[in-house]
Image: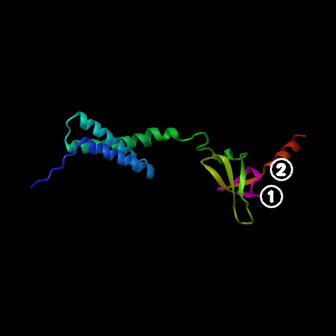
Amino acid sequence: MEWMFAVEPWHWLVLGIVLMIVEMFIPTFASLWFGAAAIIVAALAWLLPISILWQVLIWLGLAVLLMIAWFKYIKPLSVDRTKAGLGGSVIIGETGMLIVKPQGNQLGRVRFSVPIVGADEWFCRTREQGVEVGDRVVVVDISGNELIVAPAKRLDEQVISHKA
């Protein structure tokens, strides 16, 4: 006795909706494309008499094509290229707020209001001891992955005194 399961267009529609809902909880952009492909297959199955084998092949092919299109053409449009690939010198002169005070060999953390080269918080050190949590600091140098910061008001005073 042979058992045949008929796949109806609404099966594809439900599968597509479920996969898109899964994408909301697991944001990998993988199930989104399988869900979109399933919805397209549902529409095609309603319009044309397509065998289950062709439905599955179309679904897999569309999912792969949509993923390739996403990673090759669409996702690169969302990358902020204003500072991508530039040297560390783009960070020097940026002003942020000290959220963890550096002490001795323990690194501090500085937070920027706008992400700088992909991160809004960076590890930092200071050459001066007169900084406290909440102080505005400016990046004066870079040492590896750590920023060297100085109090922003003192740097402003130095600039003014040099101009006078």
Residue identifier under label 2: 154
Specify the quadrant of the image occupied by residue 110.
bottom right
Residue 104, label in figure? none
Question: Residue farthest to the bottom?
Answer: 105
Residue at 23% over, 43% down: 8
Spot occupied by residue 141 in the image (x, y as percentages of width and height): 73, 51
Q: Which residues are magenta?
A: 124-145
Query: Alpha carbon of mark 2 to alpha carbon of mark 1: how far?
Result: 11 Å
Q: Earlier in the sequence, mark 2 or mark 1?
A: 1
Spot occupied by residue 88 in the image (x, y as percentages of width and height): 66, 48
Specify the quadrant of the image occupied by residue 106.
bottom right
- Secondary element under disc 2, as helix, strand or loop, is helix
Residue at 38% over, 44% down: 33
Residue 5 as seen in the image, left or right of residue 140? left
Residue 19 as seen in the image, left or right of residue 91? left
Cβ–Cβ under 8 Å for marks 2 and 1: yes
Residue at 50% over, 38% down: 77
The kind of residue on which mark 1 rests is Glu
Asked if the magenta segment contains residue 141, the reply would be yes
The kind of residue on which mark 2 rests is Arg
Residue 128, label in figure? 1
- Dot 2 alpha-carbon crowd within 10 angstroms: few under 14, some 14 to 19, many 20 or more: few
Mark count? 2
Question: Residue farthest to the top?
Answer: 47
Residue at 82% over, 45% down: 156
